[in-house]
């Protein structure tokens, strides 16, 4: 199983999951990158740089896809977009984007639901494409490196147990994600 996971197929899986995660938030894109980073550090395959590159390109493509959808379709096209909670997310993203595009787009890359709202809203509200895409490229690269390094750190601790390294790296990533969500929610409540 490890031989299969360590081959180039894992990079295809990472690409697809990260791309889908940019559009369908419940897809485990982050976890696939973290697990691939753990596998890379524990076994040497795939190369860490390949995991980072594939994850960064997929994240960028997904963010650009959302931006383009927002530009082309707006924020009211489908019924789910008109739900009060989703409307509040779009409105909040719009207010934040008006105050500083770079910080908002960069930060949103690390927060799954915020990422979708910000990228769609950036497209719909006319953020210049070149500006968005430049920021998204930097954010995607930093995000991919971060996710991969979290996994690689665990993989380096457990080089003789790649499956355990992958499982532990996913648990660590989930915990870090929960902490980030908690901090983000508290900061949002304080701003209101």
Image: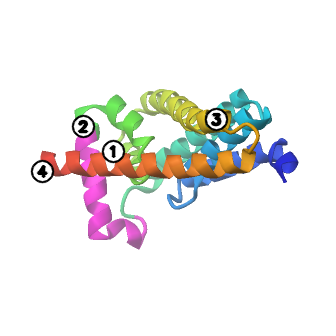
Specify whether 53 is left or right of 94: right
128 w.r.t. 12: above or below: above
Residue 157's label in the rendered image is: 3
State whether residue 127 appears in this view. Answer: no
Helix, strand or loop for disc 1: loop
Instruction: Write down the quadrant of residue 109 in the picture.
Output: top left
Residue beneath the point at 41% across and 54% down: 113
Image position, residue 36 (x, y; %): 69, 42
Q: Which tag, 1 or 4, sits closer to the chain's start? A: 1
Question: Is 93 in the magenta?
Answer: yes
Instruction: Write down the quadrant of residue 33 in the picture.
Output: top right
The local crowd at label 1, few if under 14, some if 14 to 19, many if 20 or more residues have their Cα within 10 Å, is some
Q: Which tag, 4 or 2, sits closer to the chain's start? A: 2
Helix, strand or loop for disc 3: helix
Image position, residue 144 (x, y; %): 57, 35
The residue beneath circle 1 is 125
Q: Nearer the viewer, mark 1 or mark 4?
A: 4
Specify whether 146 is left or right of 90: right
Q: Main secondary structure of the magenta part?
A: helix
Instruction: Write down the quadrant of residue 180 in the picture.
Output: top left
Q: Which tag, 1 or 2, sits closer to the chain's start? A: 2
Residue beneath the point at 58% across and 32% down: 149
Residue beneath the point at 35% across and 51% down: 181
Whole-number angstrom distance, CA of label 3 to CA of label 2: 44 Å
Image position, residue 179 (x, y; %): 36, 48
The residue beneath circle 4 is 192
The residue beneath circle 2 is 98
Viewer-closest of 118 and 39? 39
Question: Is 79 in the magenta?
Answer: yes
């Amino acid at each position: 199983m490890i031989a299969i996971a360590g081959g180039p197929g894992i990079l295809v899986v990472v690409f697809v999951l990260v791309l889908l995660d940019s559009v369908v938030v419940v897809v485990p894109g982050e976890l696939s990158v973290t697990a691939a980073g753990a596998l890379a550090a524990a076994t040497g395959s795939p190369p860490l740089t390949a995991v980072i590159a594939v994850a960064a390109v997929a994240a960028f493509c997904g963010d650009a896809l959302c931006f383009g959808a927002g530009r082309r379709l707006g924020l009211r096209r489908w019924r789910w977009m008109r739900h009060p909670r989703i409307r509040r997310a779009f409105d909040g993203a719009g207010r934040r984007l008006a105050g500083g595009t770079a910080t908002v787009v960069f930060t949103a890359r690390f927060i799954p639901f915020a990422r979708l709202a910000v990228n769609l809203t950036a497209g719909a509200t006319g953020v210049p494409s070149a500006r968005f895409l430049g920021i998204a490229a930097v954010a995607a690269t930093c995000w991919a490196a971060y996710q991969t390094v979290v996994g690689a750190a665990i993989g380096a601790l457990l080089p003789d147990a790649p499956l355990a390294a992958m499982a532990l790296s996913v648990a660590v990533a989930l915990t870090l994600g929960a902490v980030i969500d908690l901090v983000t929610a508290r900061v949002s409540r304080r701003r209101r």
